[in-house]
Image: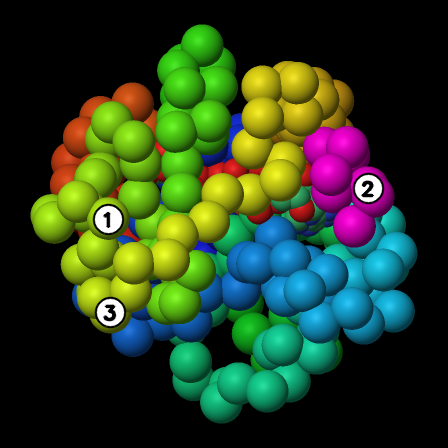
């Protein structure tokens, strides 16, 4: 099964994708994570992407569609994929159709996480991750069980994203409204869009997504 998780910054796409990886053995393809890895590695893609990401704007369609195609080529055809943060423009949606069809894959669901935009700034500015294993946390909504120690790997080293400040978050939301939300009708016309309340507790959001995937 191949699915898209769609929603504005901080809607919970990454959180829910990680839970689906654990519960269903699907693979998460997050263009944001892949771009951040490229920035960290100092690759040509990373060098091009860094300033754009730090400003909260969108990286070019060619770059992100290229990395998605390459990532899919590394997966067994039967592996289910969660597209997290991709596609984000009409051109990327068009590219994804081609990328999937040339690899004999089908898109089964587009799940839109519906959220109250006012809550997103708080969610994003409170977010941090384990610098060692990448487990995600939040100052208010998901603290490590033992203060300062990662639940998953025991590391005491945490980090915050450079684009997780209020000013950049507002630009990211504007980009979402202008370029990403308008792609929903493409998938609505195919009858594959489901809407889930992204303001619910994380566990309830997961239950609602599971119901969509299981056709309940
Ligand atoms: P990307 O990394 O994709 O960022 P984003 O879309 O802005 O999404 P986030 O990762 O901020 O949010 P999320 O929805 O995953 O929320 P999360 O689960 O972490 O992109 C970053 C940048 O890369 C872009 O700005 C752009 O420059 C570039 N880029 C990436 N893809 C691109 C593309 N396709 N085209 C062009 N450019 C691209 O949750 C947020 C916080 O809330 C967490 O702390 C979490 O614990 C908490 N939380 C989650 N769910 C809940 C809940 N139900 N209740 C309470 N708290 C919750």
Residue at x-position 56% and y-position 74%: 105
Q: Earlier in the sequence, mark 1 or mark 2?
A: 2
How far separated are the C-alphas under marks 3 and 1?
A: 12 Å
Where is residue 153? Give x, y as percent. Answer: 24, 69
Disc 3 CB within 8 Å of nearest ligand 1 atom = no
- Whole-number angstrom distance, CA of label 3 to CA of label 2: 32 Å
Q: Nearer the viewer, mark 3 or mark 2?
A: 3
Residue 51 lies in the magenta stretch: yes
User: Are the residues at dot 1 and dot 2 in contact (C-beta closer than 8 Å)?
Assistant: no
- The dot on residue 52 is 2
Q: Residue at x 40, y 67 (%)?
A: 132
Is ligand 1 less than 8 Å from the beta carbon at label 2?
yes
- The quarter of the picture where residue 141 lies is top left
| Sequence-first tag of 3 and 1 | 1
Of callouts 3 and 2, which one flags the residue occurring earlier in the amino acid sequence?
A: 2
- Main structural element of the magenta stretch: helix, strand or loop? helix
Identify the mark at residue 148; answer none if there is no mark.
Answer: 1
Dots 3, 1 in contact, CB < 8 A: no
Residue at disc 1, CB closer than 8 Å to ligand 1:
no
Of residue 97 and residue 177, the one placed in the foreground of this image is: 177
For disc 1, the neighbor class at 10 Å (few under 14, some 14 to 19, many from 20) is some
Region in magenta: 50-57
Compared with 59, 83 (above or below) is below
Q: Is residue 8 left or right of residue 212?
A: right
């Amino acid at each position: 099964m191949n699915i898209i998780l769609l929603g504005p910054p901080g809607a919970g796409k990454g959180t829910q994708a990680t839970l689906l990886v654990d519960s269903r053995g699907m693979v998460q393809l997050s263009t944001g994570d892949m771009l951040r890895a490229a920035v960290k590695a100092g690759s040509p893609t990373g060098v091009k992407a860094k300033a754009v990401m730090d400003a909260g704007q969108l990286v070019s369609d060619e770059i992100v569609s290229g990395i998605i195609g390459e990532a899919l080529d590394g997966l067994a055809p039967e592996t289910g994929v969660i597209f997290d943060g991709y596609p984000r423009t009409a051109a990327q949606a068009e590219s994804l159709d081609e990328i999937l069809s040339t690899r004999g894959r089908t898109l089964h669901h587009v799940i839109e996480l519906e959220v109250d935009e006012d809550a997103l700034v708080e969610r994003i500015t409170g977010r941090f991750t384990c610098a060692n294993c990448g487990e995600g946390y939040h100052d208010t909504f998901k603290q490590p069980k033992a203060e300062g120690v990662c639940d998953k790997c025991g590391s005491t080293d945490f980090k915050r994203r450079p684009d997780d400040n209020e000013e950049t978050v507002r630009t990211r939301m504007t980009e979402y409204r202008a370029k990403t939300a308008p792609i929903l009708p493409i998938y609505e016309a195919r009858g594959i869009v489901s809407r889930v309340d992204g303001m619910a507790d994380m566990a309830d959001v997961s239950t609602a997504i599971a119901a969509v995937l299981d056709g309940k």
